[in-house]
Image (cartoon, grey):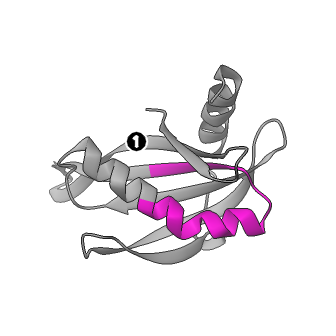
Amino acid sequence: MKLTRKITVLLLLLLSAGCAKETSQTGKTINFSTGKTAEVFFEKQMSPENEPVLVVDYKTDEKVVTEKNVETEVSEIWDAVKDEAEKLDIDQGIIRYKYFSEEKIEDGKPVKLYAGLIFTAEKIENGTWKIDKIF
């Protein structure tokens, strides 16, 4: 991924951070190789350069054990939604992976806090997809 594309991804994330509404997203159930089942949400958004990007959101209440597990899940998530990107003629994707990090008490009630990782998916010349961790 070129530096300019990383900047594009960051701009898209900043612009869409509070804008994406779950109601406009499409949901899909993922059956992970570990036997776990989860729901992901995705939608087409436009980058600041007016290029279409498939943005995928995944949130888990499990704490991240290893980076390898996260990378495996992200790969399986993209495998499950890449057909949607191809149907929409999209060659870029962003996977926002959020995981439970801690619980704190606010106003006497427990509140879950999440941390996250960002990955990009890019269709390369031979038609396959390359996934990179951004941060």
Q: Is residue 93 left or right of residue 95?
A: right
Residue at the far front: name it.
126
Res 53 seen here: yes
Q: Please give the residue where the numbered disc 1 appears in the rendered image.
A: 117
Part of the protein shown in magenta: 76-96
Q: Is residue 110 above or below residue 134?
A: below
Q: Please state which of residues 17 and 56 is positioned toward the viewer in this rendering.
A: 56
Q: Residue at x 80, y 60 (%)?
A: 89
Q: Farthest residue toward the top?
A: 3
Q: Amino acid at mark 1?
A: Leu
Q: Position of residue 101 (x, y in %)?
A: 22, 46
Residue at 19% across, 53% down = 63
Q: Position of residue 127 (x, y in %)?
A: 70, 53
Q: Quadrant of the C terminus?
A: top left
Query: Can you tell which quarter of the image residue 66 is in?
Result: top left
Residue 40 left/right relative to 48: left
10 in magenta:
no
Residue pictured at 66% horizontal, 39% vertical: 12
Left or right: residue 48 versus residue 11 is right
Task: For the N terminus, give its image quadrant.
Answer: top right
Which residue is pictured at 72% across the width and 51% down the height? 91
- Helix, strand or loop at label 1? It is strand
Please tell me whether residue 76 is drawn above or below residue 124 in the rendered image: below
Q: Crowding near pointer 1: few (<14 within 10 Å), some, many (20+)?
A: some
Q: Is residue 113 visible?
A: no
**x then y, percent, for residue 97:** 41, 51
